[in-house]
Image (tube, coloured by chain):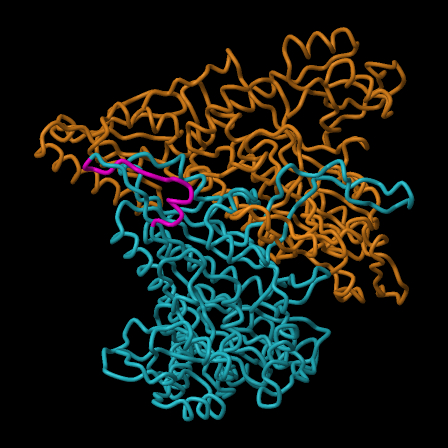
Chain colours: A orange, B cyan
Amino acid sequence: MSKNLTKRSADYSKWYNELVVKADLAESSAVRGCMIIKPYGYAIWEKMQAELDKMFKATGHQNAYFPLFVPKSLFEAEEQNAEGFAKECAVVTHYRLKNNPDKKGELIVDPDAKLEEPLVVRPTSEAIIWSTYKNWIQSYRDLPILINQWANVVRWEMRTRLFLRTAEFLWQEGHTAHATQAEALAEARQMNQVYADFVEHFMAIPVIQGLKSPSERFAGAVETFCIEALMQDGKALQAGTSHFLGQNFAKAFDVKFATKEGTLDYVWATSWGVSTRLMGALIMTHSDDNGLVLPPNLAPDQVVIVPIYRSEEEHAAVAAKAESIKKTLEEKNIRVKFDNRDNFKPGFKFNEYELKGVPLRIAIGPKDLEKGQVELARRDTLTKQFVAENDLCQIITDLLATIQKELFDKALSYREAKVTSVDDFETFKKVLEDKGGFIAAHWDGTEATEEAIKAATKATIRCIPLEAKEEVGQCVFSGKPSNKRVLFAKAY
Amino acid sequence: MSKNLTKRSADYSKWYNELVVKADLAESSAVRGCMIIKPYGYAIWEKMQAELDKMFKATGHQNAYFPLFVPKSLFEAEEQNAEGFAKECAVVTHYRLKNNPDKKGELIVDPDAKLEEPLVVRPTSEAIIWSTYKNWIQSYRDLPILINQWANVVRWEMRTRLFLRTAEFLWQEGHTAHATQAEALAEARQMNQVYADFVEHFMAIPVIQGLKSPSERFAGAVETFCIEALMQDGKALQAGTSHFLGQNFAKAFDVKFATKEGTLDYVWATSWGVSTRLMGALIMTHSDDNGLVLPPNLAPDQVVIVPIYRSEEEHAAVAAKAESIKKTLEEKNIRVKFDNRDNFKPGFKFNEYELKGVPLRIAIGPKDLEKGQVELARRDTLTKQFVAENDLCQIITDLLATIQKELFDKALSYREAKVTSVDDFETFKKVLEDKGGFIAAHWDGTEATEEAIKAATKATIRCIPLEAKEEVGQCVFSGKPSNKRVLFAKAY
């Protein structure tokens, strides 16, 4: 297997596109902007889903399922949300095809099967869910409602890239309803924290938690919390968002509840989501010019065993040893693949698993059998060592934890080196151009300034960090007063 | 919680509709024919998914994800399949809404955003998947492809019922590609067997495996295997299907492969699916006039503990005991809910869990504490017993297995009593009307006879059982020769 992968330094974007396809993660489909997630890519997504789902349930959420379609009249109800998504939604207008009377074998949209009301394919489900919650909520006793949904959504993006921006994508969307503002705000914060924990501990990607500026908020939100990560090309990637929706949707759908005190009030809401976009972040954070690098916690195969042999006899002996090692490791809940395919050479297999980012590779040949050892190779550092068979299980257990930690540490060092505090606009532009990464700068809080900076540099405010310190300063663009630094960056 | 559930004997169909809603399983949505699967219903579906997913993976399948939309030109490619689904599909024709210039706040479909080619919302994914497999398959080395997808699909049904027939439903669809006819046929049989095993062992529903008659086959299939179950009203329900597709899709999408022998051949295919319809089967098979009855293997909560108390002091003592029992049971991997809500009376809770079908209920009051016992009630038999606390864990473990087995046995006895062999059409009509169930009768193998019987009685051929014995006979309708009995029934 020849990799022929474009180098990151030559063309980062091309490297990414090639890697996604060559590592068998996903590919484009016959439908504009929609991807096919291939088994290897989907296996990683399944691991992510399983961990997130556990975390959601541990914080009291239950899964449910709401319709794919949103009637136009419901879609319209919350004005900002409708405005935000109307320009990029797929619309079902008919419910039947019929034979083209003029051309045998061709189907045409049946004009007699036009829907009375067009249906929007959900770009997000607040509208359909809040029109439902209206019937579920009468009193404070019905609150909170803590529901999550795993689903596909469609946003008709004009420029798409595998995982990062696709017309259809897979995600989860949490939709909660609360009796008080404080409780809803706490929920939005909590779920942003859950996302940060997941992305850091499982994906080994450090993130900065923050708030979006008004212009970058979710359409219909009062406040948007987010986690922001930094990719190897110095561009930021929004990895997840958690929205405090205030009473906007409750008002749009007239969802009131009887309070403990006997008054009527609108319900407070949150929504929060992460998507298959996380796959893009995972790929771009750790991988190198040899291919994918996967953190052990999410790797479908954590260890691959490749047998080395010439004769049938050697093959049998090596395979027996490989099977026994596989069994021992699996007893420790380590995910092991033994690649015993006879029609591919070891070198081909080495290349393939490097490209696919399997964290550890064991090679065993006849000489190793004699010596009671195996060759163990790390994908992340590309280092190799001989390990006595007796020590193998412990060493692998330790190494998987080490790799997980070191991937995170490496990404964190990179990120930390790429946050630059800047106090004037010339330096801002220079740092952005030469170094990239996050620029911590004062901002006067106006949309006009945000727009002007974006127009001049393509950088946007990624977030106002939750941990930003209060300090006296002047806006990097307008010179007006500011009391904290926000993070600018070019972004995916 | 007052149940007010219509009795099955009074109106079975009404009973079902009410039960689905009152047990909090699902409800209708604002979108015609689309349902909302509520958390309790979804929790059962999740258990079903998890078990099926394990069985698919154990038989070598991997999950992947293909687009929601099928371009019309691909949809048309396999003629029978297109014909079968064209009349009931949702069609996306536009990709944008815009503000109505004549009415503020209203959105209209933007006529400038018409798609060049309409997109069909997948009613099933053979077309999009086989147009993809074409690029994945060159040689016999690329085969077999064994892929499954968990997804939503849309079929624009005119008459819908929660779970049983909805415009959008959730399902899994397996799509496999093989080098030989024999291998594809074996796969189709194997997956039908997997479905039978799952439905019998987890859902406690006995099924008959068989083949569909040509007129009941999946559109585009050469042979359709199925599992058929019998509901309490004597109507049959198709619980799953597994299709041998021959080379139909390979020919439609020109998918050829180089054989080991160096020739070119079309690829052999299967597809197979079960859906949220299984929820309907589960509900209808076991439940009674008091509500849902769930088999322990799929019950989200297998045991519920209800505390009985008057004073705060009693409450504290009973709750402490309940917590300790919960912990002990959970250590044995038993799913336990302790309902410690203070604003609902025990009688209300008893009713609620009866309605929701929790297999076992523990009630603990102050007197039980004194005696070192609890009251244990079975949902399926509605019987109660006092159990010494020391024996509780073992008794519950045993009882859960017993209930699982007895639910299956009961359903099997019912089904067996409802299979009637019939040799003349007058008796056929009489049995169908008076007794219902499956009628085992000879059939001459023609579609004309099938149609005539259906027109006269509404009964259809549910399947030609795999285990049907060869015997000389005459068609129950035409009197023509026949060599085996097939099963007729009215069906969902």
Q: Is residue B253 magenta?
A: yes
Residue appearing at x 74%, y 7% in the figure: A427
Asked if B174 appears above or below B485 in the picture, the reply is: above
Residue appearing at x 51%, y 80% in the figure: B455
Q: How many marks?
A: 0
Asked if B361 appears above or below A112 in the picture, the reply is: below
Front residue (pair B272, A51): B272
Q: Position of residue B447 (x, y in %)?
A: 41, 72
Q: Determine the image quadrant of residue A200.
A: top right
Residue appearing at x 30%, y 52% in the figure: B184
Front residue (pair B357, A384): B357
Front residue (pair B34, A182): B34
For residue B52, side relative to residue A139 (left or right) = left
Residue A151 visible in this rendered orientation of the protein: no
Q: Position of residue A199 (x, y in %)?
A: 56, 36
Magenta stretch? B247-261
Q: Determine the image quadrant of residue B112.
A: top right
Residue A8 visible in this rendered orientation of the protein: yes
Q: Position of residue A354 (x, y in %)?
A: 36, 25
The quadrant in which the N terminus of chain B is found is bottom right
Q: Position of residue B205 (x, y in %)?
A: 42, 75
Front residue (pair B133, B381): B133
Residue at the front extreme of this rendering: A102
Q: Is residue B219 magenta?
A: no
Asked if A417 appears above or below A185 in the picture, the reply is: above
